[in-house]
Image (cartoon, rainbow, N blue to C red):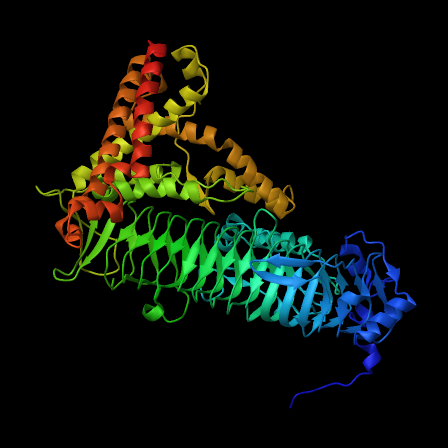
Amino acid sequence: MNIIKKYPVNSLGYNFVDEKYLPKGKDEYHLRNLHNKNSVDYRKLTAQDIETLIRNRNTSDDWNKIFVAKQFNPELVRNCKFYGLIRIGKLESFYLEFHNLRMSVGIYNSTIISSDIGNNVCIDHVNYLSHYIIGNEVMIANVNELTTTDYAKFGNGIIKKGEEEATRVWMELGNESGGRNVIPFNGMLTGDAWLWSKYREDDALLNKFKEFTEKCFDNQRGYYGKIGDRTVIKNCKIIKDVLVGTDAYFKGANKLKNITVNSDENRTTQIGEGCELVNGIVGFGCRIFYGVKAVRFVMSSHSQLKYGARLINSFLGNNSTISCCEVLNSLIFPAHEQHHNNSFLCAAVLMGQSNIAAGTTIGSNHNSRSADGEIIASRGFWPGLCVSLKHNSKFASFTIIAKGDFPAELNIPIPFCLISNDVAHDKLVAVPGYWFMYNMYAIARNEWKYIARDRRTEKIQFIEYNFLAPDTINELFDSVKLLEKLKPDNLGTAEIKGWENTNRKTVLHKVPNAILIFKELIQYYGTMELFKHMLHNKFTNFNEFKKSLSAKLQRSKWLNIGGQLIQKSEIETIKRNIKSGKVKSWVELHDFYKKQGGAYNVDRLNHGYTALLEILNITTKQFTPILFIQLLQQALRTKQWMYKSIFDSRAKDYSNPFRKMVYDNNEEMNKVLGRLEDNSFIQHQLADLELMKKQVKLIIKKIK
């Protein structure tokens, strides 16, 4: 039985907040008055205003409760019902236009309850508009319901006065059982979500994160929804408890409930047809279109959901795109791509620069007694077409997985591997260093692509996109040690244990080649860090240059904190500072991210130097001008090898007969694909190589 309550009609629009929840000496409008900052000097309606409004078929429970700006034109309000305290800005005889939507300024055919309306707005056929603060030059047309409740939280995982803890909204990241749940909040960064979901054994730390969140928001009831200046909303059904920034654009959304939509004049957010978003945060500059469903979620700035995508109990990092897919219980770092249908991502932590192919099934609980499995993939994770993976699995950086149904859990500790399931011979096959042997173009281009696509204007976290960085270099060191213990046959093939939860063989191919490549890359990385340091500082001689380098001899450990690489020692320090009270808020933790980002180049230089000394097995005393010259010359040769590999790997697409067979001639192919010689990325790499040649010559002259 539906319980329908009856109240006097003259109480409609009043008593928004129960008296028991009002602070002493405050009325139900105190928060509304605090947050309406349009600086309009309101006046009461004149008798002539009221006469005009009545003639235009408007009604009000109390005309004395309607206040207007000096330049209010009552002729521009028609066929409306007003209840409660209403404040309206100036209305002038203009029409506003946005994307071919043209609306005359004014309020028409709508029911308005206890709301503030800015200057020169266009509101038409809003069936139920209640408890909103609407900015200037806002356009709203054909909306069924636009309302705010007295307990509105706008997507933040907080509870209001009188509510039970059970009503709090959590996001269950990385594990379907809820064992890594976090509280969503406006302004949450990927690093925040990772730290909160990772260190579950540290109750003191988790409690501090909860305190940080609760301090960000007021538990008072009675906050009004807000729609910022120049926002356009048309043909939407239900918008409830939604906070909207400026310059947003909603068209045809089915349901938006309990969310914050960040948007401003430089980072506009759009939500399109058929979308349903509940209990979440939408970042600046996001795009959400065509039947998207999102529940208990955070979308970071400049991310996209499209074409029926579903994002549930998940965090999506900056500059990421998910189309046609289902994503559940996942924590996704920045620069994630997932474009194809039938993809399914469940209970996973993907640490950035990932690309999920069509038909991929990441996460299956069929090998567990409950839904508590996890998959963790370091950055650069690329599962191929129709890959099926099992919980629990873990992958080193830049793992690429060939098409196949992998029957058991995987633990891949070596980065830059190609992993495949050899069904015919019943074995797991890995090719360490695959990218550098066969597809240098793809891995190098991705770094370039992600940098170009990073549209953040507020870069609180410095995101590392280089495939050679402290995290991957440390993995390469561990890999060299592991590979050197193996005894490959004459073909460079060796067997290894512990990579798959089965009794069958795991076979590694090209082991000697991988060792040589990994060592060369480590040396190249260290040399390039010194090379950049030399270029960016005006050292007059080698001794001055060497004195500027750190005396530390131990290579530091690093963690990927939401796409930002930070030394493990710094993370341990910040955790202690949070628990001790030295760091008191999310803002202060974000300041820590900024500080670490500012120090990153120096920290990376120190890491590169210690990595170079370690791979060469020398001391700082043995780092001489002659050796540095030799290292620069070798780095140049490595750069030339990289450029040639980039060119050759792309050239295969122009010489492969099975790719060429769809074209009648080379001219047709070049028109469709573009000429290989004109490839902008290859041209960019060639220019880098030529510049490096010149710079190395200048440095060698200076050193000599």
Question: Which of the pair 547/695 is nearer the observer?
Answer: 695
Quarter of the figure with the N terminus: bottom right
Residue 409 appearing in the image: yes
Q: Among all residues in the image, which is located at the extreme left? A: 490
Does 664 sit left or right of 225 as displayed? left
Q: Among all residues in the image, which is located at the extreme top? A: 704
Question: Which of the pair 225/473 is nearer the observer?
Answer: 225
Q: Position of residue 270 (x, y in %)?
A: 54, 58
Does 525 sit left or right of 597 as displayed? left
Q: Quadrant of residue 464?
A: top left
Q: Position of residue 45 (x, y in %)?
A: 88, 65
Q: Among all residues in the image, which is located at the extreme right? A: 47
Question: Which of the pair 224/65 is nearer the observer?
Answer: 65
Does 390 sit left or right of 197 as displayed? left
Q: Position of residue 627 (x, y in %)?
A: 29, 17
Residue 154 appearing in the image: no
Quarter of the figure with the C terminus: top left
Does 337 sit left or right of 562 as displayed? left
